[in-house]
Amino acid sequence: MRAIFRFGLVLLLLTSTGAIAQDRASFTVGTATAARGQKAFGAIQVPAGSDAPLTIPVAVVHGAKPGPVLAIVSGAHGTEYASIVAVERLIQQIDASAVSGTVILVPLVNVPSFEQKIAHVNPVDGKSMNRFYPGRMDGTQTERASYLITKQVVEPADHLIDLHGGDLDESLRPYSYWTKTGNEKQDATSREMLLAFGLDHIIISADRPKDPAASRYLENTASTRGKPSLTAEAGHAGTTEPQDIEALTNGCISVMRYLRMLPGLRRSWNRRSGSSGSPASRARPPASSRRWSRAVRMCRRA
């Protein structure tokens, strides 16, 4: 009888750990600590090592009600301005009193790239800040930053969105990545997140690294740790076109609605017409609806 009781207690603890973690009175990332129903600002402090220290800004929106933890990150490439502006706007727009759960927002990972207007890499060590996850504390600035983002942003999160915005020398159509991990439940959730995000071109990836210790990319770092996630990109040539910024901000809000972190309807896509919007207001996606419908069919079949 005691053995059965102990087994039941262990099972209860295992199944309730997530809920307990998400129902905390305050939530801390770096130096930002937000009380329930509040928004807080701070930084992830990357200490000096073989090169200079780095301060990465972070905001925490700790909702009035418990719920999942969503991380939204941008600025791995500091001249992809549309994605950086999008997260800055989300920080301003998201009202903690309306949120169920917690949102971790990191608007600019690659601060040196932003300050020096250097595309693709961190000029301090010449490395891409989306290629060295999960990072290490005895490495260069990029590797140390990647390690602390893994520990302080990815690991506390339940879901993750990695935003990009078309670098100075890139002309890209808006698109998103869906990484298939082989975990049916996780893949189903990440697929629905991606469809809720609503970009009309989807890349299905099944060849990302599977080893959590060599995850390489931010989104894949979340995926290999069992967290449904996606990468989305809208923007081109370092511009800040309103339609690109809105595609990213609206996509994140729609995912939050899908996750029941915000009230309201997520974006809905009509598979025949490719139209988007709520029942009261529908608008065509930015590219051909035929192409979007084909992308949705591929995603649903995969």
Image (cartoon, helix red, strand yellow):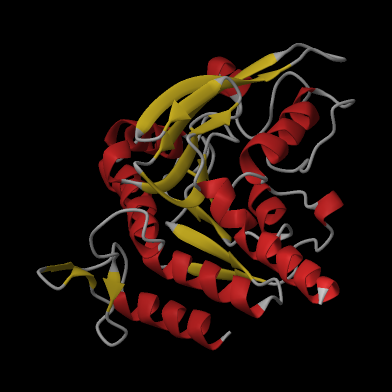
Q: In the figure, 260 relative to 168: above or below?
A: below
What residue lies at 71% left-to-right and 40% top-to-bottom? 150
Q: Nearer the viewer, residue 242 or 30?
A: 30
Give how far across and how far down residue 68 sits, in percent. Answer: 49, 53
Give how far across and how far down residue 295 sits, in percent. Answer: 45, 77
Locate residue 134: give its quadrant.
top right
Left or right of residue 289, residue 34 in this image: right
Left or right of residue 225, residue 235 in this image: left
Q: In the figure, 182 relative to 263: above or below?
A: below
Give how far across and how far down residue 113 sits, in percent. Answer: 60, 23
- Can residue 95 be seen here? no
What residue lies at 51% left-to-right and 19% top-to-bottom? 42
In this view, the residue farthest toward the left is: 280
Number of disc labels: 0
Q: Nearer the viewer, residue 177 or 241?
A: 177
- Can residue 250 be seen here? yes
Q: Nearer the viewer, residue 138 or 156?
A: 156
In this view, the residue farthest toward the front is: 1
Locate residue 196: give its quadrant.
bottom left
Image quarter in which the C terminus is found: bottom right
What residue lies at 64% left-to-right and 65% top-to-bottom? 15
Image quarter in which the N terminus is found: bottom right
Q: In the figure, 27 relative to 176: above or below?
A: above
What residue lies at 78% left-to-right and 40% top-to-bottom? 132
Give how far across and how far down residue 87 sits, in percent. Answer: 41, 36
